[in-house]
């Protein structure tokens, strides 16, 4: 799990670097989203609660909602809840 943790830390740092780089540009909004547990293999017997289609609908709605939210949390869940770094 060391490699997973390192990759997550790098993604989080990249997110914050991008936020800081584009903080004055109101045409760019940057945040990092935990997409939820998704049945990426497409099997109905997979215990993950979301199909890839359901996850896509949730994320599309989230992106529309967050379009102009430049002051909100930068690390969020697919349901727009704070996801601590």
Image: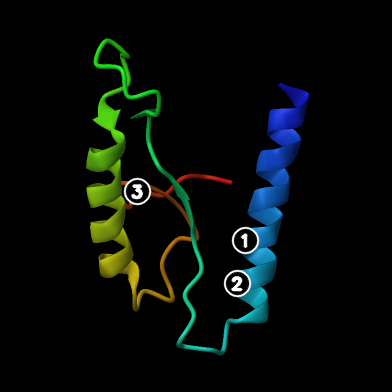
Q: Tell me, for residue 15, which label it has, or none.
A: 1
Residue at the farthest front position: 42
Marks 2 & 1, CB-CB < 8 Å contact? yes
Q: Nearer the viewer, residue 37 or 82?
A: 37
The residues bearing labels 3 and 1 have C-alpha atoms spaced at a distance of 17 Å
Q: Which residue is mark 2?
A: 19
Image quadrant containing the N terminus? top right
> Closer to the N terminus: mark 3 or mark 2?
2
Determine which quarter of the picture holds residue 27.
bottom left
Of tags 3 and 2, which is closer to the observer?
2
Residue shown at 64% from the left, 70% from the top: 18
Image-quadrant location for residue 54: top left
What is the secondary structure assignment of the residue under circle 1? Answer: helix
- In the displayed structure, does residue 22 sit left or right of residue 6? left
Q: Are marks 3 and 1 in contact (CB under 8 Å)?
A: no
The residue where tag 3 is placed is 81
């Amino acid at each position: 799990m060391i490699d997973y943790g390192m990759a997550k830390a790098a993604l989080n740092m990249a997110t914050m670097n991008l936020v800081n780089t584009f903080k004055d540009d109101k045409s760019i909004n940057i945040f990092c989203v935990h997409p939820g547990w998704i049945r990426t293999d497409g099997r109905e017997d997979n215990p993950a609660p979301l199909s890839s289609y359901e996850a896509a609908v949730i994320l599309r709605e989230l992106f529309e909602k967050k379009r102009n939210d430049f002051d909100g949390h930068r690390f969020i869940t697919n349901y727009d809840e704070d996801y601590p770094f």
